[in-house]
Image (tube, rainbow, N blue to C red):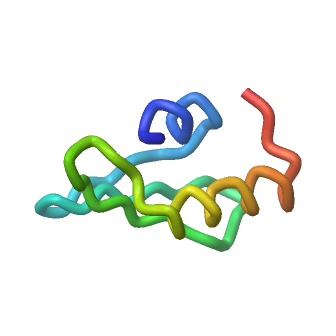
Amino acid sequence: MRKLLIHLGYNERTKGSHHIYFKEGIEEIINLQPMDNKAKAYLVKQVRELIAKYKLEP
């Protein structure tokens, strides 16, 4: 998921184990917390909704 967000133009800021993604023009931020290389289901849903809402394309 991290690679996808970077590919979509998000900027990454790391604070401890948290990876925070933000993009100019988009109010919502995404806070990823690594868990055995698997994304939590609610984070996948959140990212999918943002992609649809803002019609993001690589």
The residue lying toward the viewer, choosing from 24 and 3, is 3
Where residue 33 sits, quadrant-wise, is bottom left
Question: In the image, is 25 to the left or to the right of 33?
Answer: right
**Residue 16 against residue 13 in the figure, above or below:** below
The residue lying toward the viewer, choosing from 58 and 13, is 58
Question: In the image, is 52 to the left or to the right of 36?
Answer: right
| Total numbered labels placed on residues in the image | 0
Q: Position of residue 22 (x, y in %)?
A: 52, 58
The residue lying toward the viewer, choosing from 38 and 33, is 38
**Residue 24 against residue 57 in the figure, above or below:** below
Residue located at (87% from left, 47% from top):
55
Question: In the image, is 34 to the left or to the right of 48?
Answer: left
Residue located at (12% from left, 62% from top):
16
Residue located at (62% from left, 71% from top):
28
Residue located at (47% from left, 41% from top):
1
Q: Position of residue 54 (x, y in %)?
A: 84, 56
Q: Quadrant of the C terminus?
A: top right
Q: Position of residue 27 (x, y in %)?
A: 67, 72
Q: Position of residue 42 (x, y in %)?
A: 53, 69
**Residue 17 against residue 29 in the figure, above or below:** above
Residue that lies at the very extreme toward the left in this rendered image: 16
